[in-house]
C-alpha cells in the first residue's frame, strides 16, 4: 500500500544514529545520504528522515505512530534496546505481548530523538 514514509527531524545526524541502530536490528543497512535526507530501503518500502525542505522547524504528528514489522519478540526487544541506547525514550506500556480483538501481538514503543512515535510489532504465527 505504501511506497515510503518520511519524517522531519531537527538534527539529521543524531536521527541517523538512532535509525541506523534501530533499523539495523531489522537487518537494514545504514541510511544512504541524498542531500539533506537519509533513506533506508527494504524490499517492501522505504523509510526516510529529512530536515524540512520548506525551512520550517520539524514537528511531530500528534497521534501518529510508525510501525516496523519484526520477526520475533527478541528482535522487537533488540529494536527497543537499540533505540534507548541511541537517544530514544520508551513510551506507552513496556514492551511485551498485548491481547486485543485480533489476538495476541508483541509491541515495543519508542519515541525517536525528535519525539516521533515508532513501534516494533510482531504477530505470532
Image (cartoon, rainbow, N blue to C red):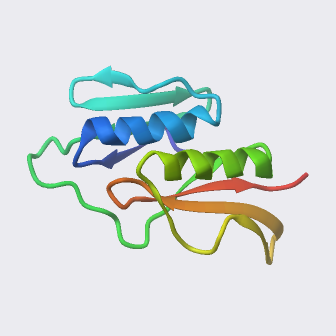
Using the image, determine if residue 50 lies above or below residue 88.
Answer: above
Q: Residue at x 21, y 24 (%)?
A: 35
Residue 25 place in picture, x, y as percent: 63, 36
Q: Residue 63 sits in which quadrant?
A: bottom left
The location of residue 8, given as percent across then percent down, is 28, 48
Q: Measured from the top left, where is residue 90 in percent x and y?
A: 52, 64
Q: Which residue lies most toward the left here?
A: 55
**Snapshot quadrant of residue 82:** top right
One can see residue 4 in this view: no
Q: Is 88 drawn above or below residue 43 in the view shown?
A: below
Of the 4 image quadrants, the one containing the N terminus is top right
Examine the rendered structure and indicate whether residue 62 appears above or below residue 53: below
- Residue at x-position 67% and y-position 45%: 78
Q: Residue furthest front?
A: 85
Q: Residue at 51% across / 37% down in the picture?
A: 21
Q: Nearer the viewer, residue 84 or 70?
A: 84
Q: Is 109 situated above or below 14? A: below
Q: Position of residue 114 (x, y in %)?
A: 32, 56
Q: How many marks?
A: 0
Comparing 41 with 106, the one in front is 106
Amino acid at each position: 500500500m505504501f511506497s515510503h514514509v518520511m519524517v522531519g527531524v531537527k538534527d539529521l545526524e543524531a536521527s541517523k544514529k538512532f535509525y541506523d541502530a534501530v533499523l539495523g536490528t531489522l537487518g537494514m543497512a545504514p541510511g544512504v545520504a541524498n542531500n539533506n535526507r537519509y533513506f533506508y530501503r527494504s524490499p517492501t518500502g522505504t523509510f526516510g528522515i529529512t530536515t524540512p525542505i520548506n525551512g520550517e522547524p520539524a514537528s511531530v504528528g500528534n497521534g501518529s505512530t510508525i510501525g516496523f514489522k519484526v520477526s520475533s519478540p527478541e528482535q522487537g526487544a533488540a529494536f527497543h534496546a537499540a533505540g534507548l541506547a541511541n537517544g530514544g525514550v520508551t513510551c506507552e506500556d513496556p514492551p511485551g505481548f498485548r491481547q486485543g480483538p485480533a489476538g495476541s501481538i508483541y509491541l515495543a514503543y519508542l519515541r525517536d530523538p525528535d519525539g516521533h512515535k515508532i513501534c516494533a510489532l510482531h504477530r505470532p504465527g
